[in-house]
Amino acid sequence: MKIAIVMGSKSDYPAIQRAEEVLKDFGIEYKTRIISAHRTPSAAEQFSKDAEAEGFEVIIAAAGKAAHLAGVMAANTPLPVIGLPVKSSTMDGLDSLLSTVQMPKGVPVATVAIDGAENAALLAAQILSLKYPALREAMREYKNKMEQEIIKADREFQESK
């Protein structure tokens, strides 16, 4: 199990650190790179073309502003690509979200919320769980734990009233 996390700029790193933490929690190997769709287009194209041969099974692409990184990755690989729009200095990340989600026919990108790194990692884990039964069981346990935490919080809330 191996996931590529690609960010368009080093300034995107705070937005994706939670993705790394989630992947660590699930025992999923990952590699994080800085590759810009606009400033290093040849590197972005080559990385996405080589990703499968390098052993990656899913790509998470995080970018802000024009946020074309996920689309460039998806255009050049058969692997699933998850776009992670990053809140930029303008438009509170709406520009990034629209740039990531509005892909043309034939080049799909699964897109999570602005700065939704945790969900990007969880979606990547769920995709991999189709192939890895132990990971699927870990996802079941994660969801059950989350459910139990909410039930407990509700019970405590009700008792405090």
Image (cartoon, helix red, strand yellow):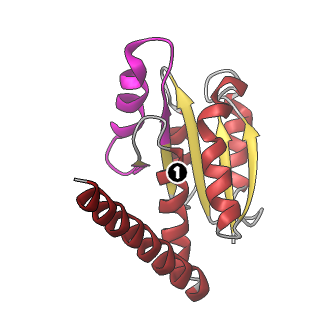
Instruction: Give the residue at x 33% y 61%.
Output: 156
Task: Give x and y (percent) for residue 114.
Answer: 43, 35
Secondary structure at numbered mark 1:
helix
Q: Nearer the viewer, residue 153 or 34?
A: 153
Task: Give x and y (percent) for residue 154.
Answer: 28, 62
* Depicted 127 relative to depicted 95: above or below: below
* Depicted 4 relative to depicted 29: above or below: above
* 155 relative to 42 in the view: left or right: left
Q: Which residue is mark 1?
A: 118
Instruction: Give the residue at x 63% y 66%.
Output: 57
Q: Which residues are magenta?
A: 84-110
- Total number of numbered labels? 1
Instruction: Give the residue at x 36% y 39%.
Output: 101
Q: Nearer the viewer, residue 146 or 123?
A: 146
The N terminus lies in quadrant: bottom right
Q: Nearer the viewer, residue 113 or 5?
A: 113
For mark 1, does the 10 Å Cα neighbourhood hold few (<14), some (14 to 19), or many (20 or more) residues? Answer: many
Residue sitting farthest toward the front = 160
Instruction: Give the residue at x 49% y 70%.
Output: 126
Residue sitting farthest toward the bottom = 133
Residue 161 is covered by the magenta coloring: no
* Depicted 9 relative to depicted 155: above or below: above
Task: Give x and y (percent) for residue 86.
Answer: 51, 30
Task: Give x and y (percent) for residue 139.
Answer: 50, 75
Residue sitting farthest toward the top = 90
* 18 relative to 51 in the view: left or right: left
Please state which amino acid type lies under the numbered disc 1: Glu
- Res. 152 image quadrant: bottom left
